[in-house]
Image (spheres, coloured by chain):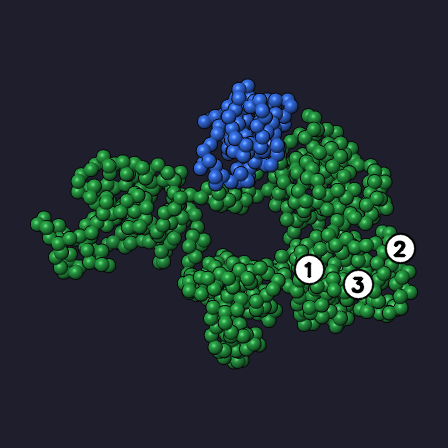
């Protein structure tokens, strides 16, 4: 699929400059619509910047694809939104455990296929 | 690499007593500490960490043994970045800056990393100077009591081999009680320091001065033993407070004195006893450690009403259905409603010719039931009144005909216990629906739904010889349907209730059933689906009947039969195509058939359900945790 590394909030620094995918809950959308505050799967709060306005609701779960800049923020290329039915039973903690697992066993969870 | 990711200054803040912070730190060193005990139970290692916050390092950080697996799984290692979720500060010697951090919970954020920054050891002066202000708070308990307590007349103080008898004379006590600094040593005073009451669950061998306020929930009899060092005697007791429970023992000289002094049900302040890792062979309480009273132990009866806040007993209940998953001969705590009780029974032991009285009761909870056997006095004294809630603490699991429970001499039986909310919950449930429910009875070999059915891959079926045993095997598999045999999906079935035989179509409106030996004018469509399911490891043909097939195809056999009669090929193809689009959990029954020397395993689908991704994820994590230590 994509060649983005799935990470959580604490891993931002480590993946500076690399293409990443982050899943989290939107805590706030700035009035400009270009900046989103995201609560990641490990309960960290990060900032996502976009060149275009992003139409997301606070409280919804989204996936952000982009790059980590040198201020530990995400410069996003695209945002994936989900239907409420799809995210109703999403287990964020389980996702976080999966992300940690991917980091722990990089040879078993390949990214650049 | 910059160290902005680590929480600089956190180490000093922890040592000053601010332990609420969840700092991100780096592990710069790990050391194994060997346990000094000499018995085989010392399987639990203790790890000591040196942590860095980017600027400073601190080397006296003890890792809670419940986190040992992180090191053994190579997740927590040198240079790993961690987040501290729960930490406590212990003072070994406050005045000289000898402190220690006890890490109870942490999460590994990143196992592999470069060393961040160039941290240097935290200067002792910083710790001493800044820790002074919090002298009485560092043990951070909720029971912070005012500093100048006049110690009440010490009625039951024990101070081993001292000349000071229990005294009502306030003089001796007053001298020691008002000097509240850290050098309140036990040598001079025989007084319990009630300022430092900590909870049982935080007791560990590394805390220097501690006091606990506990109730004696059980007290065993004094027993004698022989070991390499000669004869000895001991007794065990269980101590309880709001946070948990711990087992304590007294040996030889101390044994008699303390056994005479402690009374079951009373609350005591206890201080200065040894703590060592728990010996799981004899101790099934939840605590990591067990206590041994020694020469220096101080015990004081708690006179005031404050003792009422200490519970009488700590339960660690498991649901009755979980008993199925526990090994026989192990001990557990359970609670349930006594749905029925048999009469008192007398049996004669074949081996010893002794007479034993016993009483079987049927214990039920919301998901299962089980037979619990009471013995001797407990059987005789059991009140056979209207369905009480009964709690058992320390009851043994047996495996007769599945699972049973049997009391032992140390088992505590409590009817309608007030210490747990389960009592009310069970009473309410029983009144509403429990009394008329027919629950799976573990003592009658019941299989509790999916709980006991293991998950397998299709490849494991041949690898493990599933289905080849005398009894049928039940397994769960996570698969997709790849093929369905179209022609034989439904068959014409005898309309006679419970017959089920395929009828012969005589093509004149009559249908003959050989089993009933009758000819009928009608028939019923019935499913007998042959489907191929597949997962990542292989494929397997299975059969699905009535209910399962119906839920799979989304229509009744009759509806499907009609489509077949009308030759609605497109509709049928569509139905099949739709079922093959997603993964499901199939519960299969595997049993070998013997056909003329040929052995074929038949797989019948017992249940089809959708994948609960959350549970499935958890299941996989458990499996991964089991194999983790073997890798790398």
Residue B397 - label: none
Up-down: is B580 above or below B174?
above
Give the alpha-carbon distance from disc 2 to disc 3, as whole Å.
18 Å
Task: Tell us which disc is closer to us: 3 or 1.
Answer: 1
Query: How many neighbours does mark 2 have within 10 angstroms: few (below 14), some (14-19), or many (20 or more)?
Result: few
Give the alpha-carbon distance from disc 3 to disc 1, as whole Å.
18 Å
Residue carrying label 3: B298
Up-down: is B175 above or below B231?
above
Residue B228 visible in image: no
Provide residue A17's location: percent of width, then percent of height.
Answer: 59, 22
Helix, strand or loop at label 1? It is: strand
Q: Who comes first in sequence, dot 2 or dot 3?
A: 2
Residue carrying label 1: B241
Provide residue B628's location: percent of width, then percent of height.
Answer: 55, 42
Chain B takes which shade in the image?
green
Residue carrying label 2: B179
Chain A takes which shade in the image?
blue
């Amino acid at each position: 699929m994509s060649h983005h590394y799935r990470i959580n909030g604490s891993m931002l620094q480590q993946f500076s400059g690399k293409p990443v995918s982050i899943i989290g809950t939107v805590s706030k959308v700035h009035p400009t619509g270009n900046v989103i505050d995201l609560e990641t799967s490990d309960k960290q709060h990060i900032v996502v910047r976009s060149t275009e306005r992003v139409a997301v609701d606070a409280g919804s779960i989204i996936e952000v694809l982009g790059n980590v800049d040198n201020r530990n923020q995400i410069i996003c290329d695209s945002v994936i939104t989900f239907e409420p039915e799809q995210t109703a039973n999403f287990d964020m903690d389980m996702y976080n455990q999966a992300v940690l697992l991917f980091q722990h066993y990089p040879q078993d969870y390949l990214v650049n296929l | 690499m910059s160290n902005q990711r680590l929480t600089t200054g956190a180490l000093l803040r922890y040592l000053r007593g601010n332990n609420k912070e969840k700092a991100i730190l780096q592990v710069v060193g790990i050391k194994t500490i060997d346990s000094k005990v000499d018995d085989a139970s010392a399987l639990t290692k203790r790890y000591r960490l040196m942590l860095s916050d980017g600027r400073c390092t601190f080397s006296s950080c003890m890792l809670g043994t419940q986190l040992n697996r992180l090191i053994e799984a190579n997740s927590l290692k040198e240079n790993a970045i961690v987040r501290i979720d729960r930490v406590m500060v212990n003072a070994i010697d406050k005045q000289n800056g000898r402190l220690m951090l006890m890490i109870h919970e942490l999460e590994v954020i990143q196992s592999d990393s470069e060393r961040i920054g160039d941290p240097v050891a935290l200067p002792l002066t910083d710790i001493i100077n800044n820790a002074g202000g919090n002298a009485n708070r560092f043990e951070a308990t909720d029971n912070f009591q005012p500093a100048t307590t006049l110690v009440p007349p010490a009625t039951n103080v024990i101070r081993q081999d001292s000349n000071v008898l229990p005294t009502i004379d306030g003089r001796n006590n007053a001298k020691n009680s008002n000097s509240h600094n850290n050098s309140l040593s036990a040598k001079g005073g025989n007084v319990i320091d009630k300022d430092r009451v900590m909870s049982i669950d935080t007791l560990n061998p590394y805390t220097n001065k501690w006091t606990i306020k506990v109730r004696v929930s059980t007290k065993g009899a004094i027993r004698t033993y022989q070991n390499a060092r000669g004869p000895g005697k001991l007794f065990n007791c269980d101590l309880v407070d709001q946070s948990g429970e711990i087992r304590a023992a007294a040996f030889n000289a101390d044994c008699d004195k303390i056994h005479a002094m402690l009374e079951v049900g009373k609350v005591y302040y206890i201080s200065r006893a040894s703590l060592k890792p728990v010996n799981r062979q004899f101790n099934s309480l939840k605590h990591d450690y067990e206590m041994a009273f020694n020469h220096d132990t101080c015990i004081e009866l708690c006179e005031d009403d404050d003792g009422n806040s200490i519970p009488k007993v700590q339960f660690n209940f498991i649901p009755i259905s979980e008993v199925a998953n526990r090994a026989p001969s192990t001990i557990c705590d359970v609670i349930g409603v006594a749905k029925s009780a048999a009469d008192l029974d007398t049996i004669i032991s074949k081996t010893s010719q002794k007479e034993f009285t016993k009483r079987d009761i049927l214990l039920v909870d919301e998901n299962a039931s089980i037979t619990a056997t009471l013995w001797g006095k407990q059987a005789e004294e059991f009140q056979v009144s209207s369905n009480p809630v009964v709690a058992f603490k320390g009851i043994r699991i047996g495996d007769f005909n599945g699972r049973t429970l049997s009391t032992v001499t140390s088992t505590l039986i409590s009817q309608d216990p007030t210490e747990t909310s389960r009592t009310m919950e069970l009473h309410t449930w029983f009144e509403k629906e429990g009394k008329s429910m027919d629950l799976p009875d573990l003592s009658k070999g019941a299989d509790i739904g999916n709980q006991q059915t293991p998950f397998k891959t299709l490849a494991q079926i041949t690898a493990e010889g599933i289905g080849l045993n005398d009894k049928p095997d039940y397994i769960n598999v996570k698969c997709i349907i790849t093929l369905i045999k179209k022609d034989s999906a439904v068959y014409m079935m005898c309309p006679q209730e419970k017959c089920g035989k395929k009828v012969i179509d005589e093509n004149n409106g009559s249908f003959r059933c050989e089993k009933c030996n009758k000819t009928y004018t009608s028939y019923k469509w019935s499913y007998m689906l042959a489907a191929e399911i597949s997962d990542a490891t292989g494929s397997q043909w299975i059969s699905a009947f009535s209910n399962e097939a119906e839920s799979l195809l989304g229509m009744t056999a009759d509806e499907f039969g009609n489509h077949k009669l009308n030759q609605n090929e497109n509709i049928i193809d569509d139905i099949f195509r739709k079922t093959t689009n997603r993964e499901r959990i199939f519960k299969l029954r595997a049993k070998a058939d013997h056909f003329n020397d040929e052995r074929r395993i038949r797989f019948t689908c017992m249940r089809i359900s959708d994948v609960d991704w959350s549970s499935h994820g958890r299941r996989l994590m458990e499996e991964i945790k089991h194999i983790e230590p073997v890798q790398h």
